[in-house]
């Protein structure tokens, strides 16, 4: 009799625990969709909660074996819970969480080869706080922050080798200041010098050719100078002859 009473108490306690436990995403509210380029695992709201729709937000929902995306409304089962996309090679493509049709928390995306592509934070469907994008080789491409889907504060841009190219400052989507990094400036100067040297070599080659070709043309001006000198000497001799002329000398006597 005591054993029976004890077992009944245990059953009641376990029933209370099951009722008290909050199950947001039960198994029966998950869908699996197969597309040509991806496989999707998504959860939706099984309780059909009434949502105050924001006309400026994009809502994700499920209908007719497809995931829909519309601004300011939906007409199907609103996505709510974990969401995962896979490539056909089973690698992750995109992963995150929906809260009544809006992206919420950290979302990640990957390239086909498994390298991470993007990491971004969302709040009520809008990009907020930190984000990072990556090249396919795994190097950081861009890092910064958003405020309500607009670039805000410091944003850094890198090349595919990981070198910092520039640092920009934004204020709610508007570029306030753009600053090129020292390394990028040095690299640009080196490239400019190399180009300048290459063009300088070609120009110097042209100049030497012009000088060589100009040697023949300089012969005539030298001859003209010599002729001018001769003419001046003749004039002096003629003038001298006039001064010491015999007739003029006799008259003076």
Image (cartoon, rainbow, N blue to C red):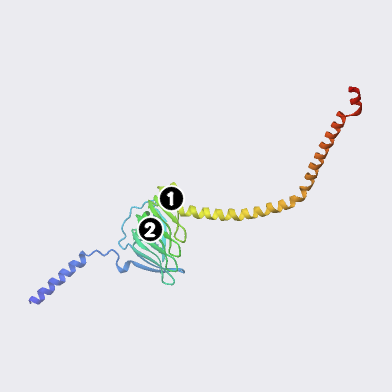
Rendered location of residue 195, percent (x, y): 58, 55
Compare marks 1 and 2 and give the one earlier in the sequence. 2
**Residue located 47% across and 58% down the image:** 159
- Can residue 73 be seen in this snapshot? no
Please identify the residue farthest to the left as the structure is shown: 2
Crowding at dot 2, Cα within 10 Å, few <14 / some 14-19 / many 20+, comes out as many
Q: Say whether marks 1 and 2 touch (CB < 8 Å).
A: no
Which quarter of the image is occupied by the C terminus? top right
Residue placed most toward the observer, 128 or 170? 170
Q: Quadrant of residue 107?
A: bottom left
Rendered location of residue 183, percent (x, y): 46, 54
**Residue located 60% across and 56% down the image:** 198
- Can residue 251 be seen in this snapshot? yes
Task: State how many labels appear.
Answer: 2
Please identify the residue farthest to the front as the structure is shown: 253
| Position of 40 relative to 222 (above/below) | below
User: Horizontal placement of 233 versus 134: left or right?
Assistant: right
| Position of 71 relative to 25 (above/below) | above
SS under mark 1: strand
Please name the residue that numbered disc 1 is placed on: 168
Foreground disc of the pair 1, 2: 1
The dot on residue 150 is none
Please name the residue that numbered disc 2 is placed on: 120
Residue placed most toward the observer, 79 or 145? 145
User: Horizontal placement of 31 versus 226: left or right?
Assistant: left
**Residue located 38% across and 57% down the image:** 131
Rendered location of residue 213, percent (x, y): 74, 52
**Residue located 86% across and 28% down the image:** 243
SS under mark 2: strand
Q: Quadrant of residue 94?
A: bottom left
């Amino acid at each position: 009799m005591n054993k029976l009473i004890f077992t009944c108490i245990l059953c009641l306690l376990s029933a209370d625990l099951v009722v008290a436990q909050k199950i947001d995403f039960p198994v029966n509210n998950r869908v699996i969709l197969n597309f040509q380029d991806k496989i999707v695992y998504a959860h939706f709201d099984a309780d059909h909660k009434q949502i105050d729709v924001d006309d400026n937000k994009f809502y994700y929902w499920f209908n007719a074996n497809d995931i829909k995306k519309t601004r300011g409304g939906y007409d199907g089962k609103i996505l709510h819970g974990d969401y995962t996309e896979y490539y056909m090679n089973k690698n992750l493509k995109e992963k995150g969480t929906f809260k009544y049709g809006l992206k919420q928390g950290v979302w990640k995306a990957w390239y086909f080869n498994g390298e991470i592509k993007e990491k971004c934070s969302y709040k009520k469907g809008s990009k907020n706080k930190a984000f990072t994008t990556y090249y396919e080789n795994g190097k950081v491409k861009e890092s910064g922050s958003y405020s309500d889907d607009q670039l805000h504060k410091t944003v850094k841009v890198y090349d595919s080798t990981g070198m910092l190219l520039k640092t920009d400052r934004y204020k709610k989507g508007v570029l306030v200041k753009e600053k090129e990094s020292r390394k990028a400036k040095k690299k640009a100067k080196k490239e400019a010098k190399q180009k300048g040297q290459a063009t300088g070599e070609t120009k110097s080659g042209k100049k030497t050719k012009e000088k060589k070709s100009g040697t023949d043309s300089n012969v005539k001006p030298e001859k003209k100078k010599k002729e001018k000198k001769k003419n001046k000497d003749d004039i002096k001799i003629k003038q001298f002859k006039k001064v010491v002329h015999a007739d003029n000398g006799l008259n003076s006597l």
